[in-house]
Amino acid sequence: MKYVGEPVTRVDALEKATGRAVFGNDVALAGMLHGAVLRSPYPHARLVEIDTSLAEQAPGVRAVVAGRHFPFTFGASIQDQPFLAIDRVRFAGEPVAAVAADTELQAQQALDLITVSYDELPAVLDARAALAADAPLVHPDLHTYRRGGHEIVPHSNINAVAGFAHGDVEGGLREADLVFEDEFFAHALSHSALETHCAIARYEPADHGYTLWTSTDRPFQMRRELAAALGLSGRQVRVIVGYVGGSFGGKSTLIAEAPAVALARRVPGRPVRVEFSREEDLAASRVRMPAFVKLTTGVMRDGTLTARRAEFLWEGGAYASNAVGIAVRGPKAAFGPYRLPNIEYRSRMVYTNRQPSGSYRGYGTTQAAWACESQMDMIARRLGIDPLTLRLRNGLRDGDPWINGQIMRGINARETIELVAAEIGWGTVDRAPAAHLRRGQGIATMIKETATPTSSNVVVKVEEDGEVVVLCAAPEIGAGQVTVLRQMAADAIGVPLTAVSLPPTDTATSPFNGPVASSRTTYHVGNALHLAGQEIRRRVRALAGDLLAVDPDLIDLEDGVIVQQGTGPRLTLGELLHASGPEGHSLVAEARYTSAGSALLKADPGGEWVSTIFWMIASQAAEIEVDTETGTIRVLKVAAAADVGRPVNPVACRQQIEGGVVMGVSNTLYEELIPAGGRIGNANLADYKLATAQDVPEIIPLIVESDHPEAPFGAKGIGEPAAAATAPAIANALCDAIGVRITDLPITPAKVLAALAEKGREEPRRG
Amino acid sequence: MMRVTLSVNGHRHEVDVEPNLTLLEYVRERLHLTGTKEGCGVGECGTCLVLVDGHPVNSCLLLAADADGRVIETIEGLSVGEEPGPVQAAFVEAGAVQCGYCTPAMVVAAEGLLRADPDPGPAEIAGAVAPVLCRCGSYPRVQAALRIAAAGRKQP
């Protein structure tokens, strides 16, 4: 290995630092029109009438479209979402009409000329209300919608039901010395990538299809979602992706693409661009799915866990988006990286009249870890056991069975926990640096699977001069995908890193790939590259053997040079290809990797669907300072360790770990979407507060290794676990500092003060 | 329309602009310098920073007409010909670039600080980049890049 494992400078860094990188919203095409979207002000209403006639006459307007002109629905899990509202609106901000004009200003001004009459309906604004027997139904016809095979409750707001059990939870709880029953709430979060949602769509009359220029983390899945909605083949939908200005799971389903496509259909051959304002991005795109979590855990007096039941109620918003998978799989993380012989989870997702919930870095695991790791500390405190000791005592080890009996290979939970505890100086903290300041430490860990099975195809083109173009649909969304894939391609094939390029994704020419999500890219595309590399090498050996009249088994390809064992370098790859085809040459190999069928996925009967091809484990230890007069928390230091298998690029891994902590601190302490009736009251970046450079603790990123038998170059993944353990680590540190337990996010100064006041009232009673 | 003279990255442009055209729109849409990005359009995220007479300014909050006669530098102007400028190179070296969307603004903020204060301390550095939001969480490395760039400036 020459490049894998090295801290190679990111190949996109220079382009981005000099302002030359082209993002989706930098694309300008000839004849491009600008779109604007009219949105419902009501969370739930019948759409009685829309009159677009005045808007159609407005200056510069080329197309106006309402739901009745484009009556299609889409949805990644349930086909429930109209491109534009047809007879009902189901969340404040839902698109009801759109305008395409020569300029963005003309399009926005034309919106004011559209008149809409609504008949307001009672709205259901939170998950518990959605469950009430007399709750208004957000989708009365849910049972008629096309969907995957998951369970729903017809004639209710429950659009996903899932669960899994292993062992004997009731028995485990009975045998326990103590049973803990605790409830937690994890709030909605906006992805808030700095690049807002933006898409350009063009209807291609010759093909009756569409071309989309957009920022997405999953070009093929977006293609499929659009094609399925419109009754098209995948080939008829072409998705082109440049650099993505951050996704974090938010750019995964049709969002800006929907109104862009509806408008594009009206102006065949002309591109239509729809760019979301920051307000639309915050209030009318997607959010992390809020979750009410109840954990019932049995534990022996020495801290050994015996059983856990996890009950989840997920607040899905008005449309299911790609959130069903969260309800089905997210709860697995509620059992932590712990040995738990008896487990059960029950999960329900409901429609509400709010902005749709969808994938958000972690896909349910941040919500599950919030509950799991908060309760672990509650257990530790009650039993008088050090929280670090409690976690180590129950920690899963390589070779242990997981919740479904799958044998865990390639995990290193223990070292992540021990390392962060050591780096934070566990147990040594200056508790009262001033009269009104208290400090504490908290530790948290988490485990995440990857979606299984998924697959990746790659095509490797060796050009006639020996340089390599890799075709794979893996957009650079910011984590260094392109760099890491180039490193792996260079080593898999045997060419210099500088001789490899990965062009931007285009579904017309790239082969299929699963999403750049679920922390799966390094592992799955890496394995496909490994296979393709082997095939290239085999053919190069055969060609060289022919040309040089040498046994192919004596030939190696090293860094672009054909080397004969015992003799040394003979010629370059370019010279070989030229010699074997002077009229012109490409050597093309393709490979597909899928995790389906791996022996590693074997599990107890009935539990195979739960299996995952690899786990990632990440731990964080935080030291915080609380001001007891204001309730303000300052995070001083966070040590964060991730078990990545083997790092392909250590700097990129550290970027992810550090970035995950920053996002975690921000999510936990500062971010809250404030409801104002049925709308969002703070849909702007002054009032939806993201952490700035002045809010960042000292961060110590730590890479931990493990031995996964099927990982390419030993590498697993890192993107999601990086962000997960921060919230419980901070809550645990808060409890350590001032003895209060906050169970619902975010942790605000008001909640801290209220908890302190409550504690003050309780304490005199204890005498 | 108003006739103004805008100096952008060393080039003079005598142009007619609408009174409500922002400097951000002018730079991106009229000059096709798309290195400067939009994050919110209302001055709350810092993504659109450019240097105006050497000072970092949210270009979404400045009307093109009000930039008449001022010296404007965008991220593209901070390169040295086809090579990266020293601050840009420092960002690459420090691993301060992830998705890259905030990077032009961060570079502009850094450049603005170093022109005003060639030897900034940690508080000055954090304060200079605080107005630019980064969701990827590259703040620690951006600050490291600033330290590298400052150190580089000190050398003869």
Image (cartoon, coloured by chain):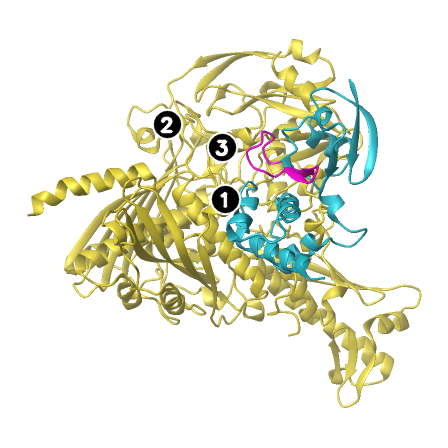
Chain colours: A yellow, B cyan
A247 or A72, which is in the foreground? A247
Q: Which residue is mark 3?
A: A686
Q: Earlier in the sequence, mark 3 or mark 2?
A: 2
Residue A1 visible? The answer is yes
Main secondary structure of the magenta stretch: loop
Element under disc 2: loop
Point out the tag, 3 or 1, that comes first from the N-terminus.
Answer: 3
Image mark for residue A125: 2
Residue beneath the point at 48% across and 13% down: A118
Element on which disc 1 rests: loop
Given the image, what chain letter belongs to the residue carrying mark 1? A
Task: Bin the neighbour count of mark 3 within 10 Å (Cα to Cα): few under 14, some 14-19, many 20 and up.
Answer: few
Q: Residue at x 37, y 65 (%)?
A: A417
Nearer to us of marks 3 and 2 is: 3
Q: Residue furthest bottom?
A: A566
Residue type, numbered disc 2: Leu
Which range of residues does the magenta coloring cover? B37-56
Q: Which residue is mark 1?
A: A692
Q: Could you tell whether A307 is left or right of A46 in the image?
A: left
